[in-house]
Amino acid sequence: MPGPPFSSLVDGLAAAVPFVPPEALERRTGKALRLRLGANESLFGPSPRALEAMQAALGRVACYGDPESTELRAAVASVHGVTAENVVVTSGIDDLLGLAVRAFVDPGVVAVTSLGAYPTFNFHVFGFGGLIERVPYRNDANDLQALSDLARRTNARVVYLANPDNPTGTWHSAVAVTKLVDSLPPRSVLLLDEAYIEYAPPGTAPAVDGDDPRVIRMRTFSKAHGMAGARIGYGIASPATVGAFDKIRHHFGVNRIAQAGALASLGDTEYVARLASLVAEGRSHYEAIGRKLGVATLPSATNFVTFDVGSKPMARAIVAALQDRGVFVRTPGAPPIDRCIRVTVGPASERAEFADVFGEIWAARGSLRLAP
């Protein structure tokens, strides 16, 4: 029996799955994964303070969370030297990307991003009827000049930049990002995704200016805070932009357990700093693994390292071979970076196990079945 017709916008969208989850791989094979290294979750876990706070909040799980996230917004504002009116709390950066696109992109209006960058932004743009224009990576990094040129040429309303970048791990300096902002058309807004900023070197994050309507800063508790499953993040923007988000956001979209954990984790700066140090150590380990095998690695300021295995067919074959051995990693989806595989930094024992499996597969790469 045919059902009611979908909207013309939804009906015209291509069917797509943005990410094949590790759980789907486990269902497909009927086996548990040995190593979960493809989703860039924190494999070191959240702060003990955050766990304690979330466990305490379970006692009131029958109640909705504070729809205004008052305590958390105040704490975020204090950390960044802005006011609570500059802060919006959302169920992760993915939610915030949707709000930003909905607030600024009318149907038929252009948004600009890098070819191969974090794809959830694209899904939101297409889902609200916008148009996407892309520039390729240059030297395996976001090409800021090309993004600026394309934004001016298309009069783009929104420009998306992840700094540090996912999926390459590369980054630009605060000076370079500020120059990009100043070069954009007057009606453009930069969505600055800083999901991995806690792992980046000093001088990567521009100073926060809560009065600048040209930039929306996006932060998450999924990475360095180890709370990906709680789905909570925040944005810093002008009060007018936050007010616009309040018109359209899901006001009960962030649960009270996530709010409690995020508030506690935000205050545990020593834990987050120690985690960043452990991740830096792990990146160095992966780079050493690459040198030993003769596999180049891209510079990374994130909690993952991208290995350059030479070609798209080889990357896909290695990902498949790793999955056959119970190791979940991902490969970027667009050229020129689709020649790489991306591997999350985990504890030393998991890195050693990955090194063994990857080393065996790499040594036998000549026998892998390569698809176009």
Image (cartoon, helix red, strand yellow):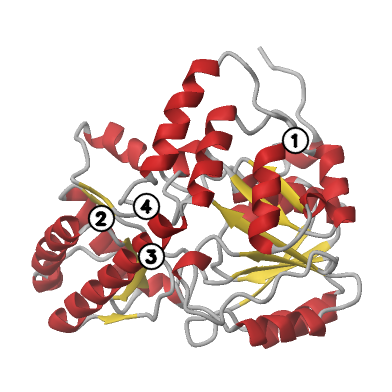
- Marks 1/2: CA–CA distance: 44 Å
Mark 1 or 2, which is nearer the eye?
1
Residue topped by disc 2: 320
The earlier-in-sequence mark between 1 and 2 is 1
Where is residue 52 shown, x and y percent of the image? 40, 33
- Asked whether residue 274 is in view, the answer is yes
The residue under the point 77% across, 60% down is 131
Decide if residue 366 is on the left or right side of residue 91.
left
The earlier-in-sequence mark between 3 and 4 is 4
- SS at mark 3 in the image: helix
The answer to whether marks 3 and 4 mark residues whose Cβ atoms lie closer than 8 Å is no
| Mark 2 residue type | Ala
Q: Quadrant of residue 238?
A: bottom right
Q: Is residue 257 above or below residue 245?
A: above
- Marks 4/2: CA–CA distance: 23 Å
- SS at mark 2 in the image: helix
| Mark 3 residue type | Ala
Mark 3 or 4, which is nearer the eye?
3
Disc 2 residue crowd, few under 14, some 14–19, many 20+, Cα 10 Å: some
Mark 4 or 1, which is nearer the eye?
1
Residue topped by disc 4: 42
Where is residue 176 shown, x and y percent of the image? 65, 86
The answer to whether marks 3 and 1 mark residues whose Cβ atoms lie closer than 8 Å is no
The answer to whether marks 1 and 2 mark residues whose Cβ atoms lie closer than 8 Å is no
Residue topped by disc 3: 276
The residue under the point 56% across, 52% down is 220
